Image: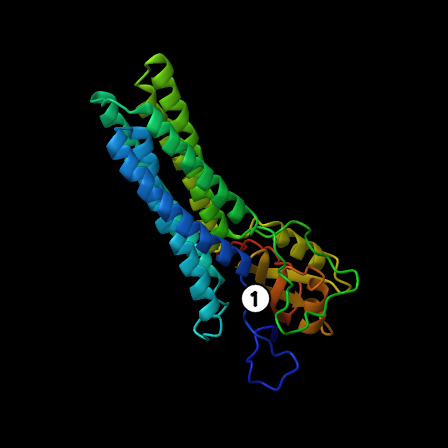
Amino acid sequence: MHTESLHRNPLSPSPRAHSHRFDTGNPLAEKNTTLAVWLTLSMMVLEIAGGYYFHSMALLADGWHMSSHALALGLSVGAYVAARRLAGDRRFAFGTWKLEVLAGYTSAILLLFVAGWMAVQSLDRLRAPLAIDYAQAIALAGLGLAVNLACAWLLRGGHHHHHGHDHGHDHGHHPAGHAHDHAPEDLNLRAAYLHVVADAATSVLAILALLGGMLWGAAWLDPAMGLVGAVLVAVWALGLLRDSSRVLLDAEMDAPVVQEIRDVLAAAPQPVVLTDLHVWRVGKGLYACIVALEARDGVTPDAIRQQLAIHEELVHITVEINPAQPAPRPVEAERPAQPRPRPAAP
């Protein structure tokens, strides 16, 4: 059996030695998310105080909702900092990028709790409405919307950044190398972005509800819009929970790169039989794979690795080659036993 991997000890003199820091981080997102935290905290205090003072459930819900977002945004910043500071820690076999994904997963759970709290509070306010000071509440909700939109703009700008694939080693890419053109997704940044977009949406709903109550006396619109906001937040949270959990559980075998690996092996110059394949994500748009093959003499792990390296998203390739098994000989059907002749009677 021949086995070769791009998993190398940095202290080894082997020319194949490389770092396992596959993801280079997202400094712009870290900086912008930190600024968004401070903006969100400031607006949170104003909206909660204003909601209590003006008796607006929509404004109060938006303020408490913003408090959870401030916590989630802080969690995102913490994940960026931890992933950066622990990047050289050898306990992490495939780098620290999943710390960011874990933060996104946790933020999704927080969003679900927020949606539940908004629904409960809105139902309670439907049963026992309070008089609302509409003009002041609308002004404060408008200010909250402006802050949310500013934060959303900051976080949206961090989605597109250069990944570089600069991992300190040579992948041996073929000149006709293949790379996906789409920008890899930062799930931690997406979590932060969804939090502020959800906040912006609840701010819009709060303003509409307050306007309806002020112009037409429809006080029930305030808690009703709180319920609509709760549903929107829950839907966004479930989507983020689904995507982040797929990464954390390595449920990536339906990713396009899996079929691309199969296609490369099927077109290999020397015939090989794929007996085992594992693919998982180690960075934003970056994958590791383990390939087990059966092949005739002359097929080397290096050759297979070079063929797979045309896909630049494959940054860690392990190849195992076992001798091809001979075709099984056909099993002859057993003939039925012939009955023994009976001895003649004396």
Is residue 211 shown above or below 183?
above
> Quadrant of residue 127 in the image?
top left
Locate residue 2, reporting x and y percent. 62, 75
Relative horizontal placement of residue 170, taking residue 154 as reference (left or right): right
Q: Answer whether residue 239 is visible to the viewer in this image.
A: no
For label 1, count other residues whose C-alpha is less than 10 Å away and answer few (under 14), some (14-19) or many (20+): many
Disc 1 secondary structure class: loop
Locate residue 133, reporting x and y percent. 29, 25
Residue at x 63%, y 70% (from the top left corner)? 321
Is residue 96 shown above or below 234?
below
* Residue furthest bottom in the image: 13
**How is the structure coloured here?**
rainbow
Q: Quadrant of the N terminus?
A: bottom right
- Residue denoted by label 1: 22
- Front-most of 138 and 265? 138
Amino acid type of disc 1?
Answer: Phe
Q: Answer whether residue 171 is visible to the viewer in this image.
A: yes
* Residue furthest top in the image: 216
Locate residue 277, reporting x and y percent. 57, 60
- Front-most of 239 and 65? 65
